[in-house]
Image (tube, rainbow, N blue to C red):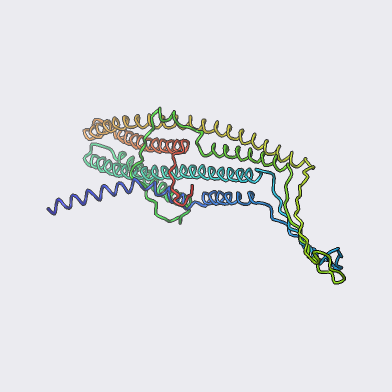
Amino acid sequence: MKNALKIILLFLVLFFGNKAQAQELESYLRIAAENNPKLQSAYTQFEAALLESPQVASLPDPTLTVSAFGRMIETRLGAQEARFNLMQMFPWFGTLKAKAQAADLMAEARFQEYLAMRGDLFYEVKKAYSELYELEETIGLKKENLEILDSYRELSLSKFRSGSSSMVNVVRVDIKREEAITEIELEQEALESLKRQFNYLLNREPGATVQIQDTLTLSKPGDSELEEIDFDTHPELTRFDRELEAYQSRAEVAQKEGLPMLGLGVDYSIISKRTDANPPMNGQDAVMPMFSVTLPIFRKKYKAAEKEAELMQTAAIQNREARENELLTIYEQTCYELKKAEKLLELYDRQIKSSNRANKLLVSGFGNNTEDFEEVLRMNQDILMLNTQKLAALKNGFIAQAKLDYLSSKTKNHDENIKE
C-alpha cells in the first residue's frame, strides 16, 4: 500500500512539474505585459487619450460681466447702480458630438497601438526565450560530448598501452577536449549575459532566476488556417482605420465650426428708487433677455482646418496600405522560415540516426584495429554539429511561429488591468 502511494505521489509530482515547466513561458509573457515600461507608457497614453473626449465635448464656459458705475446713470425709474451680464454660447448643432466622436476614435487608435506594441513585446520575449533554450541545450550537448571524448581518451590510452595504437590518438582527443571545455566556458558566459538581457526585457533585476523548459514545441498551423489570417483585424491596421475615422470626424468638426455660434443670456440692472418722484415701478430692477450670434466671416482658418483633416485622412490610408504590404511580406517570409525549419528538423533527425549507427561501427572497428581513430573523432564531431544544427532549426521554427502568432494577432491578454 505504501509503495502504491509513493508511486501515485511520484506520478503527480512529475505530471504537475512538467505542466509548470510548460507554463513557464506564459508566465514570462505575463510579467512582460505587467512590467515593461514602454508598454506601460503606451497604455498610459491610451488612458490619457480617453480624457480628451469630456474636454472637447463640453460647452464653452459662460461669460459673466459685472459693471459698476462711478457716477450712477439716471433713468426714469431711478439711478442705475450696477449691471450684470451673463452669456452662454452654444456651438452649431452636432459640433460637440463630432468632437467627442473624433476624440473617442483617436483614443481607440491609441489602444490599438498599445495592442500592437504588446504583441511585438511578446514576440521579442519568445525570441529571447528560444535563444536561451538553444544556448542552454547546446551547452548540455557539449558537456555530453565531453564525456564521450573522455571515454574515447580512455579507449585510445588503453590501446596505446597494449601496443595496438599510437600516442597521437590520445593527443588528438586531448586537443578536442580542450577545445570543448573552452567552448563550454564561453557559452556559459554568453548564457548568463542572455539571461540578464532577458530580465531587462521583463524589467526585472538582472540577477533574477530564469528557468527554461525542457523542450520547445513546434506546431505549425495547417495551410487552411494560414490562409484564413485576416490582416484587417490586426491592431496595426485597425489603428489606421480608427485614425481615418477620427480625421473624418475632425473634418466634420471643421465644417461645423465654420457655422455661427448661438448665444443666450440675460442682462440684469440694479436700479435705486427715486426720491424726487414716485413713477410707476419706481426703483424696480431691469431684466433683459439676450440673444447673440457669432459671425464666422474669416473663413481662412476653417478652410485650412478642413483641408488638414482631409490630408490626414489620405495619410492614414497611405500608412495603412504601406503597413499592410509590409505585413504581407513578413508573412510570406515567415511561412518560408517555418517550412524550412520543419524540413531541416526532419533531415537532421534522419542524419543523426544514421550518424549514430555509423559512429558505433567506427568505434567498434577502432577497437578491433580495422578503423582509423581520426574517423571516429570526425564522426563524433559531425554528430555534435548535427545536434546543434537541429537546435538552431528548432529555435528558428519557434521564432517563426511566434511571428505568425503576432501577425494573426493571437496574443492573449496577460494584462489583467486592461479595461476594454
Q: What residue do we see at 82% from left, 65% from top?
A: 80
Q: What residue do we see at 17% from left, 52% from top?
A: 6
Residue 146 at x, y percent in the picture:
32, 44
Residue 109 at x, y percent in the picture:
56, 42
Q: Nearer the viewer, residue 186 or 159?
A: 186
Q: Nearer the viewer, residue 50 or 182?
A: 50
Q: Nearer the viewer, residue 392 or 124?
A: 124
In the drawing, does residue 224 fall left or right of residue 380? right
Image vertical order of residue 19 relative to residue 271, above or below: above
The answer to which image quadrant residue 135 occupies is top left
Image vertical order of residue 327 relative to residue 193, above or below: above
Q: What residue do we see at 76% from left, 47% from top?
A: 293
Residue 143 at x, y percent in the picture:
33, 45
In the drawing, does residue 408 fall left or right of residue 318? left
Residue farthest to the bottom?
275
In the drawing, does residue 397 fall left or right of residue 258? left
Q: What residue do we see at 29% from left, 44% from top?
A: 147
Image vertical order of residue 154 relative to residue 350, above or below: below
Q: How many marks?
A: 0
Residue 114 at x, y percent in the picture:
52, 45
Q: Nearer the viewer, residue 399 or 220?
A: 220
In the drawing, does residue 163 fall left or right of residue 215? left
